[in-house]
Amino acid sequence: MKLGLGLYRHMLTRENFRFARQAGCTHIVAHLVDYFHQGPGNEDKENQPTGGRQGWGLAGDPDRLWTVGELRAIKADLNAEGLELAAIENFDPAHWHDVLLDGPKKALHLENIKTIIRRVGEAGIPVIGYNFSIAGVAARVKGPFARGHAESVGMDGGDDTPLPNGMVWNMVYDPKAPPGVVPSATPEQLWSRLQEFLDAVLPVAEEAGVTLAAHPDDPPTPTLRGQPRLVYQPRLYQKLLDLHPSPRNALEFCLGSIAEMTEGDVYTATEEYSRQGKLAYIHFRNVRGKVPTYQEAFVDDGDVDLIRVLRILKKNRYDGVLIPDHTPQMSCAAPWHAGMAHALGYLRAALQVIEEGR
Ligand SMILES: [Mn+2]
């Protein structure tokens, strides 16, 4: 197994690449969507945003897709620090909102995704993580929830207030949208949108040599902001995989989100999906509680025995990347970095024991 670090767009710097290398990472997962662009209450630029009902902020430029040049430049910069680029995480709502919403620009937006997949392949990046969700990562709260009053995020009840027009995946793609709300989709409609998406883009992914890795719903409630969710129980990951049998149809396996689900358990899910060889990469984090009431915790301090999870992965010969996803913020001058260093140190030791038999 390989140790990696996820970095938000504005954190793709030489200093952070060195930080990752120093903590024992060999891989980076890069976010290119800027979740912090003009969002209310996003002044803490390293902690994952929660953003309230207004979402995280403005989506990117709808007319400008990521170029092969910029993808190659990011890769070259981190290669120069001894790291590999494991994956790009998430599409920009500006580029594919009508795939999620079944809107008038759907055909164009499916072409956008195909173009991005081809470019990512051309740049030699093997995986794109994505989250097929209308509401996105929303309705969470921040507070001193983790050990020692460390600031962390969680959920305290749901939020089914409808999304305003112009918003999807917790970001605003059209600030000039007319007043009103996004009509609720049915679960059947949402699954059929996913089916259409996978059927359209997986042949391109196969040709480009890029694996598409689906994140489960975060938070995994059956509905959020009045919209249905796809993968809010562990068994629904199988439904997603069965929609299209491509080897490029895989999972961005988030242990935290799976642990927050009300059915099944994270050990059985890890066993089932790693045995099928369907884990593209792993979000490694811990949590206390389940939806609709949970708090993210330090890796060694939540409901999940993450050592047991690592032993299951080892047994099923998982050889991919693990990244800490998010962690509680530690009380010091560098809260995000300290939280990550703690999680990475834990993982490094655990992997030395489990993989190398020390
Ligand atoms: Mn995750």
Image (cartoon, grey):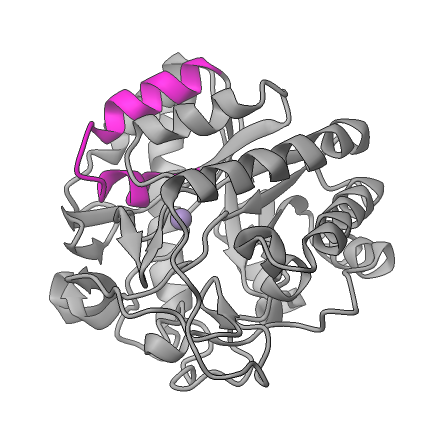
> Which of 272 and 72 lies nearest the eye of the viewer?
272
Q: Position of residue 247 (x, y in %)?
A: 63, 20
Specify whether 75 is left or right of 134.
right
> Which of 27 and 250 lies nearest the eye of the viewer?
250
Q: Looking at the picture, does residue 23 appear above or below residue 161?
A: above
Q: Position of residue 47 (x, y in %)?
A: 39, 70
Residue at the image position 26 percent from the left and 21 percent from the top: 268
Q: Quadrant of residue 272?
A: top left
Q: Looking at the picture, does residue 72 appear above or below residue 157?
A: above
Q: Looking at the picture, does residue 82 appear above or below residue 208?
A: below
Q: Is residue 282 visible?
A: no
**Is 273 inside the magenta-drawn segment?**
yes
Q: Position of residue 78 (x, y in %)?
A: 70, 54
Q: Is residue 106 visible?
A: yes
Residue at the image position 20 percent from the left and 34 percent from the top: 305
Residue at the image position 40 percent from the left and 67 percent from the top: 48
Question: Magenta stretch: dominant SS?
Answer: helix
State how many labels appear: 0
Q: Quadrant of residue 70?
A: bottom right
**Is 190 inside the magenta-drawn segment?**
no
In magenta, the rendered stretch is 253-276
Q: Quadrant of the C terminus?
A: top left
> Which of 141 and 297 lies nearest the eye of the viewer?
141
Specify whether 159 is left or right of 230.
left
Q: Looking at the picture, does residue 132 appear above or below residue 45?
A: above
Specify whether 145 is left or right of 130.
left
Residue at the image position 46 percent from the left and 29 percent from the top: 240
Q: Position of residue 163 (x, y in %)?
A: 39, 70
